Amino acid sequence: MKKIVGAVLIAIHFLAVCGGSFFLFLQPVPFETKLVLWAVLWGLWAAGMGSFLYYRKQYVDHCRQVCFYAQEIMKGNPCAGVQNQETLTSKMVMEIQKTGEILEARASTAEKEIAETQQMVSDITHQLKTPITNIKMYGDTLCEETLSGEEERQFIQIIGQQIKKLEFLIDSLAKMSRLESKMMHMHPDNCKMIHTVTQAVNTVRSRAEEKGIELQVNVRPTLEVSHDSKWTAEALGNILDNAVKYTDSGGKISVNAQNLEMYVVISVSDNGMGIDPRHYNQVFQRFYREAKAAKTEGLGIGLYLARQIITLQGGYIKVRSNEGQGTKFQIFLPKKAA
């Protein structure tokens, strides 16, 4: 279709020049003048057609080159030679290369997200399976067997414990889902750090007392920083919960706050079992638990949630530990300009 349109336009142009030539020869001017004007007219036509054909060929060659290099890029072949030239083709090839890299990165991210989702579903299924199985087993035993009053009370108590575990798991998964789907928003405000630390410590105080663990809090009452007190207390409480779990009876946990130039740092130190330095990054992954901690009740979600909450506030968490000697977590909260 494009060729037909081009041919028609050329024909119209040619007929217009012929008509102009005929009209020129009808004019009452000397014959020599007519020849000169005729030569100029056809010369201009020839120059125009030559320029048209030349630039059309250049355009076609340019398009062919771009298509060729685009196909090479799609095949994964490098086109470094043409990209280093100062030409329009080089610029277009570079843009195609960038577009290809962006699309490849997005495809890789999508595949990674799918794999993570599949892994998360698998992990959640595994975590839910244990308490549900226990509830079903003890419930069936209560219904089908004749048990003594003491045995019934024990079974009902176990079922109650498993239901609490299930509730805790579902609540943690809901928080995790809200964090990952960006549905959870932080609402930072200037408030005293002692209030946040007190909220977190109160969530573990009773269990620490049951194990005879000493809790020490050293936070200046006047220390303020812009943060979401509720969710920061949640993150700090998860770290303290781990400290209580993995510290033996009679141990010690201390919470300190330090005012630095750019951050306020909340430190949680214990003298528990410690963490292998090789696993510093892994302990913040969801559902991850070290082999030596497998016997201790837990889900492997607390530290993951803690890091997500602090990250959403522009902060970060560091961990340092010596196996058998204890662990130190540090929460860095950025200080906001007044």
Image (tube, rainbow, N blue to C red):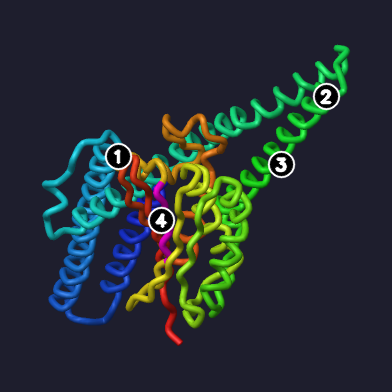
Nearer the N terminus, badge 2 or badge 4?
2
Q: CA distance from mark 3 to mark 4?
A: 29 Å
For label 1, the residue is 278
Marks 3 and 2, how far apart at CA = 26 Å
* Crowding near the residue tagged with mark 1, few <14, some 14–19, many ≥20 C-alpha atoms within 10 Å: few
The residues tagged by marks 3 and 1 sit, at their Cα atoms, a distance apart of 32 Å
Numbered range of the magenta stretch: 266-271
The earlier-in-sequence mark between 2 and 1 is: 2
Q: Which SS class for mark 4?
A: strand
Which residue has dot 3 on it?
167
Looking at the rendered structure, the secondary structure element under dot 3 is helix
| Residue position marked by numbered label 2 in the rendering | 150
Q: Residue at x 29, y 65 (%)?
A: 17
Query: Mark 4 = which residue?
Result: 269
Q: Residues within 10 Å of mark 3 (few under 14, many from 20)?
A: few
Label 3 vs 1, first from the N-terminus: 3
Marks 2/1 in contact by CB < 8 Å: the verdict is: no
